[in-house]
Image (cartoon, rainbow, N blue to C red):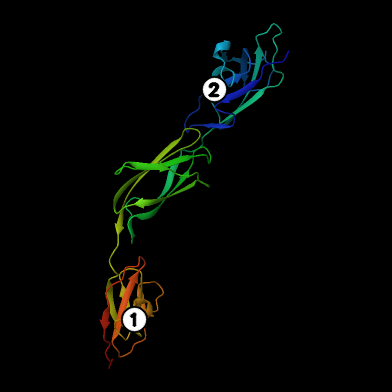
Amino acid sequence: MTPPRITATNPATGSHIKYGQNELNLEVYVNEPSNCKISKSDKTYDSMETQLSCDSLIENYTIYGLKCKTQLTNINDTSQYYIRCQDLSSNHNAMSESFVYSISKTHSPLEISRTKPQDGDVIIAGSDPFSLDLKIETTGGAGNNTICEWKETNRGYGDSFPRGSNNAYSYRLTTALNGDYNMNFMCEDVAGNKAEKNASFELRLDTNGPGIARIFNDGGLKVITIEKSECRYSFTPNLLFENLTVMESSDGREHLADWKLNTYYIQCEDEFGNRGGLLKVRPYDII
């Protein structure tokens, strides 16, 4: 005759318990009607101290076997337990080797440490609908197997993030429209630790060409725009933007061309493809 065999545990061995928790209701499944015991040290079945409560009715047999249960208390950072079972036959066949069960505490709470967009952000784009990247990062919790999701509470829709790597998660939203957003981010790890963070932000549509802040002589004709742009010029009106001469710029805000006593026709285009009107500028001779 063969001794009983432990087929499964719930939670699985090697799992974590929630942050702040030091007790666990453990379920152990065995392949035949048995009595089971548990100990914090490896002993024979008869020497083990704690008896599990086991179901021996065949009609209660599950896909994993018959269930035994117990409560583990005073769990340390990583606690290890030894389980042995003995069947109910007249031979009292007992396991000769222990089933080793380990469980770990969560050392720090699960937190959403970073979101993108952040609370209070104003995001400007040149077309509607927007393509918006939602990103979050988590810290703490029970390892990397964390499930995260988002929900836009003003409009009532949401979705799950694809599984992340290195505690970072990203989701591309391609149907975002101009307006105010209230985004709720939620995560839960394998131990049941939960984290939540909210970000309210605005998506603003930019359909205007770049504004001009200043035009002056600074070793050449300098044009300063109020947003990042590309500015071009010609000495001939009515040319296409593509045929104009590009002004030098290192930051997209300050644009420089040689100083000549000709009439400049200047036009600027922002990063969204919005173009301002054609600006006529006439330099003068500096005395």
- Return the x and y of residue 76 as percentages of the image width and height: 56, 29
Q: Which residue is mark 1?
A: 233
Disc 1 marks a residue whose amino acid type is Tyr
- Return the x and y of residue 152 as percentages of the image width and height: 34, 44
Report whether 140 appears left or right of 43: left
Report whether 117 appears left or right of 16: left
In contact (CB < 8 Å): disc 2 and disc 1: no
Question: In the figure, residue 52 lies in which quadrant?
Answer: top right
Pick the residue in front: 123 or 162: 162
Q: Is residue 194 above or below residue 131?
A: above
Q: Is residue 164 above or below residue 35?
A: below
Q: Which residue is mark 2?
A: 26
Disc 2 marks a residue whose amino acid type is Leu
Pick the residue in front: 208 or 47: 208
Which residue appears farthest toward the top when viewing the image?
90
Tell me the tag on residue 206: none
Report whether 208 appears left or right of 197: left
Q: Secondary structure at mark 1?
A: strand
Whichever of callouts 2 and 1 sits on the residue coming sooner in the sequence is 2
Question: In the figure, residue 160 lies in which quadrant?
Answer: top left
Classed neighbour count for the residue bearing mark 1: other residues with Cα under 10 Å, few (<14), some (14–19), many (≥20): many
Q: Residue at position x 34%, y 50% from top?
A: 119
Residue 150 visible to the viewer:
no
Q: Quadrant of the C terminus?
A: bottom left
- Return the x and y of residue 162 as percentages of the image width and height: 48, 44
Q: Could you tell me how far apart the alpha carbons at marks 2 and 1 are, in whole angstroms?
A: 76 Å
Q: Residue at position x 62%, y 16% from top?
A: 37
Marks 2, 1: nearer the viewer: 1
- Return the x and y of residue 185 as percentages of the image width and height: 39, 43
